[in-house]
Amino acid sequence: MEPNNSNAAFMNPELECDLVMKGGATSGMIYPPAVLRLAGKYRLRNIGGTSAGAVAAALTAAAELNRDNGGFVRLETTAKALQQPSFLRNLFQGNRQTEPLLKILMKAPEYGSELEDMALKVKGKSLSRLLLPLARWLSGIVADSGIGLRKGRWSGLFAGVAAALILSAAIWVVAALFGVVTNFLFWFPLLVLGLIFGAIGFKLGGLLTGIGKLYETATSIMPDNLFGICSGLRDPSNTYNQVAATEWLHDSIEKIAANPDRAGLLTFNQLEASHHPIKLQFVTTDISAGRPYVLPFDDLFIFKKEHFDKIFTADVVRHLVTKSRKVPGIRLPGHGDYYFLPCGSEWPVVVGARLSMSFPFLFSSVPLFRLPQSVRQAIRKTSDECNAGYVLPNTDVQITELIKQDINAELQNGELLLQAEHLVPHWFSDGGIASNFPIHFFDHWLPARPTFGITLRYLQGKPLEQGASPQQTAARRAYMHSLDQPRAVAAAAGGGDGDVWLPTAEDNVPSEWQAIHDPVVGMAEPSSVLKFALGIIKTMQNYRDNMQAALASYRERIVQVRLQPGEGGLNLNMPPANVEKIIMKGNRAGILLRNHFALRHHQWARLRVLVSRLEEAFGTINTVTTESTVADLIRDQAVPKNDFPYRKDNPDWCALERDRVLALLNLVSGPWRDRVDTFTSASTLRVTPEP
């Protein structure tokens, strides 16, 4: 990233755009340099992302809000701080008990390679050949974790010596039975066996103790830490000398957005109410309900202050408590323990970003609670104003009695007294579980400005020159063939290369191919079953985003950044050379979008898709029978005894609705009767839930 200490480059941009960024853990370092390249030409109006993309989106929104006062210069300073040695690594901080799991996670790629190499060496040989290398491998993992093994080792040593003592005594007894009575037959076996068994016990005791402690940490301690290794806050029991991830994100957002006209924490409402309104959206995943949510939301969720104290700074929790909603007729459990979340517009931006970046098991998940279903159904919406928009009617005796029977809650002075056991827990985790690249954000049939996307793809297999195995070599070669690499390089000419590519509208974007096993090359590697399982998970996670990003009228506005092994992802401790490569790719991504995207070409592609899909949809309407069907439906639904859902009995409304639908049918049977546009794409027009 080229340093730019002047704000002049970001003043008065010529155009406007929207931007969506994909999740990718440390790969998110790509985004700030790309954003800085775009910001000189475009004012960013709508910004969205998931996970690491949500972090970048939050920082970008803060910079856009404070554009005139150096917001993007501050974003550049913040991004450069991430490149300092160990700074990025030390944003990820476990507590004293979960830190061993973090140390193992950091070296997980190395462990995988070691295990695969070990399995290849003993392939086709006796399984016993694997036991000693496997024990050494496990011992190395336990040693890297830093778990205290002294007690286990000494216990193992004593157990080994005790076993040697028992066996030596048995040898002496057997010898005595045959008339051979000599102390040599006791002390010599004891000395030899004591050394052997003691050494084995010392090693094995430490290994078993370490494995046991790691198991306990993963199954008992980590769930108590809200199913995460890192809470996002510093832990006093550790020795890190810098802020942790959530603290850094919160501080960075506030510093970038700081200007004399703004007081308090940066909220979503402040972004939308600015002189140039900014819409900021993220994705999170409700694991309990099995669905994604677009953030911020206004749903009546409840948080427990004790939980939020573990994952948010004190000023953020204080803000959420102060702005929490009240629902007349409902008293939440405890005294200051549970609160309704504020309206989404009043959330601090860091809250939405943290909900989206809760990478499974790396960061603590966010527990929220729902009211019992019977209570939720009884609540009435009284206005569109979020804070005064809900009430539990305490005058409806039938409703309150049903609630009492359903959840066995007390009524006191017209209030329903809820207990903790009445609330339904919902666990929120990383948005990338459900939608890692929400390119559908801010979409319009005929857009007036582009919605740019930056997506990440990961090159498969080791480079060919590193002496990889036959399967690894085949995987690398097949992946390159799947990319249509020569065309990618040619398309990226003038500011990019084969690793950073902006397709044109007519390009064929290759699919997200994954290396599993090549049945032609030879025997499968030991990791092939794991790769197959991971391929299933990745497909479930990304299939919709991948398919949509490759469609006509989408692909020409999405720059693809391909990362080599060791770049980004969960490589938390990347060497400076890899970090520099990622920054360079981010720069090239921004340059390609800034200099090579053609809005008029994109609008024309979108028009062709829209017309084609409308013709196809209109062709399914039978105008002969539909006119009478519509008129009959509108008439019949207005009759109370027919018990139609969503009934409308206003005669004026019914007449207007009939006329509007009949006008549409006349249009379909007239100018749109026959198809004239045979343009084909995989796009469809359908009603779908967000996101």
Image: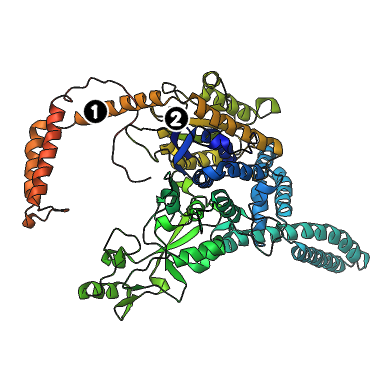
Name the mark on residue 616: 1
Q: Quadrant of residue 393?
A: bottom left
Q: Amino acid at mark 1?
A: Glu
**Relative image position of residue 39 (x, y in whole percent):** 52, 36
Q: CA distance from mark 1 to mark 2?
A: 25 Å
Q: Is residue 315 left or right of residue 280?
A: right
Residue 556 appears in the figure: yes
Q: Quadrant of residue 224?
A: bottom right
- Of labels 1 and 2, earlier in sequence is 2
Residue 459 appears in the figure: no
Is residue 276 placed above or below 93 in the rendered structure? above
Name the mark on residue 557: 2
Q: What residue is shown at x 30% (from left), y 21% (from top)?
A: 679
Task: Identify the residue at the far bottom of this view.
Answer: 413
Dot 2 falls on a residue whose secondary structure is helix
Q: Pick the quarter of the image with the C terminus.
A: top left
Name the mark on residue 89: none
Alpha-carbon neighbours of circle 2 within 10 Å: few (<14), some, or many (≥20)? many
Assess whether mark 2 and mark 1 are in contact (beta carbons under 8 angstroms): no
Q: Pick the quarter of the image with the N terminus.
A: top right
Alpha-carbon neighbours of circle 1 within 10 Å: few (<14), some, or many (≥20)? some
**Relative image position of residue 690 (x, y in whole percent):** 36, 46
Dot 1 falls on a residue whose secondary structure is helix
Q: Nearer the viewer, residue 262 or 539?
A: 262
